[in-house]
Image: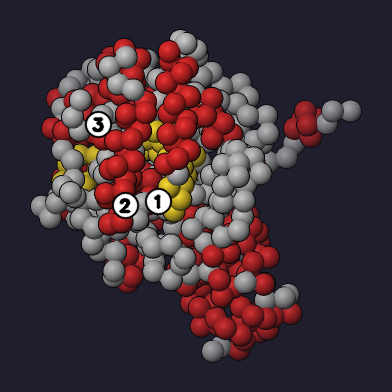
Amino acid sequence: MSSESEILLNELKKLGFEVLVDNFSEELISAKKIAESLTETMPDLHHMYDEPSNVFTPKKIDTNNNE
Amino acid sequence: MNDLHWLTIKQASEAIQSGTLSPVEYTQALISRTEQLDPKLNAYIKFTPERALSDAKKAEEAIAKNKSITPMTGIPYGLKDIIDVEGFETTAHSKILLDNISRTNAFVTNKLDSSGGILMGKLACHEFAIGGPVFDLPFPPARNPWNINHHPGGSSSGSGSAVASGMLPAALGTDTGGSVRNPATACGIVGMKATYGRVSKVGVIPLSFSLDHVGPMTRTVEDNALLLNAIAGYDKNDPSAEQNQKIPDFTEFLQKGVKGLRIGLIRHFYTTDLKADDEMCKAVDNAAATFTKLGAIVEEIQVSPLSHFSSCNSIIMYCEALSIHDKWFRTRPNDYSKATRTRLMPGFFIKGEDYVNALRTRTKLTQEINNEFRNVDLIMTASSMEAACRIDEPETVARTYPRQARTVFNITGHPACAIPTGLSTNGLPQGFQIAGSYFNESTIYQAAWANEQENPFRYEHPDIE
């Protein structure tokens, strides 16, 4: 197990998932790899501005404000 | 009347309303059919023949008094066991919820009840609508009626199995990444995931709030439209329900034909992004050719790679699902099946920035599909990349399960329907998908019905006696 994985599992234990980590640490490590592979297959949005519908504008805030 | 179990909703409804078929006689026939077949198919978690017969008598009385008759009056149906029925357990096919008695009906249960439908029981599914066909749960997995050694798709596995085997003419499933359309394709029936917000999810155990849909599963396109007629509608208690939607009669365009309809075929999903097996590829291409023969204008279109849609769906689903399962992961992780546990666990490792990027990607992908609908009336593509594999080979199930093109329309919220095409050389069902613009399920049914009429498969049934 890599030290990064060990740190993550310890964090999970601290968050209250002791039984899960104690019994299923190998499953958790496999799940971590699945999560990583998913993010690798996503399109790169780092240099893209969002679609207008996803951006907060004063007009939108105004529309949503009942006062 | 022979073979009552193969009557469509339409046929049974006409016979019931004309007085040639009694709801009690029809229900009794399906009870007998279920008692004969369910020990082999395990489609039911809770089978309730006494209640069904009591409801059938009420339907008979209502018809005698000509009181609020609908096409669903006297029609038996089943519910995936994540949909609430007052006084019944909603187990989600899980040890964790074995004692979870529902205090109220789900919105869709009320809709079917008030339309005169007859509840036959609660149907098997994948645990919490995400696990797989596994053997380490309190209930056995449902089987595929076309070959009981194969899985029936999922997660609405019991719904697919019960409808395809003639135990029921109608069932409801739920669909977060294809869980209505997958069993529909695997079992050779019709499954519709309507527009997000079309059907209320109140009283349904959530898997992923922003991706979940409730959907009708039937043996014919017309029946599917009739069942959607019964369950669609605004529910003030469902925050995702669309208040301003108009509810048409979804059968309105059935016989209109497809001449002049513009259909965009996304071929790269099943030929390049994922490679469907030869038979499935041919099945989808043949369905497209049928549309062309009938006068539709089918043109290949290109959108983002399928992996963008499926990864986006998975990231959002893992995060939303973990927010529901968090408490049980702390206290009862041993009570999940291994398949469910491992399918939920990636949520622990999705970073905040990846979740935000998935939301941004979702907006972009949705816009992209919306743009396509400016040029075409419908979009068609594959549903599964191969027919259902054996149920007792977990590694094959795990490998083939993600090979599908259904999550696209959970991400975008567009309506999408799985339609059968026929059988593979090893006797298992195949099919394809048609999607439409928002709240345009009627045009999907219009095209699906036209395709179905050209296909002799609609007269075929599995031989399971």
Question: Residue A62 is drawn in which quadrant?
Answer: top right
On the image, the x and y values in percent for residue B175 come to 46, 45
Q: Are marks 2 and 1 in contact (CB under 8 Å)?
A: yes
Alpha carbon distance from label 3 to label 1: 20 Å
| Subunit of label 1 | B
Q: Residues within 10 Å of mark 3 (few under 14, many from 20)?
A: some
Left or right: residue B77 compared with residue B325? left
Check disc 2 and report its element: helix, strand or loop.
helix
On screen, B208 above or below A21?
A: above
Alpha carbon distance from label 2 to label 3: 17 Å
Q: Amino acid at mark 2?
A: Asp
| Colouring scheme applied when the structure was drawn | secondary structure
> Foreground: B195 or B368?
B195
On screen, B377 above or below B309?
A: above
Check disc 1 and report its element: helix, strand or loop.
strand
Check disc 3 and report its element: helix, strand or loop.
helix
Q: Would you name the residue on which mark 1 appears? A: B44
Residue drawn 15% across and 27% down? B454
Mark 2 or 3, nearer chain start: 3
Mark 3 or 1, nearer chain start: 3
Q: Would you name the residue on which mark 3 appears? A: B4
Residue drawn 64% across and 57% down? B324
> Foreground: B123 or B202?
B123
On the image, the x and y values in percent for residue B7 come to 26, 29
Q: Would you name the residue on which mark 2 appears? A: B38
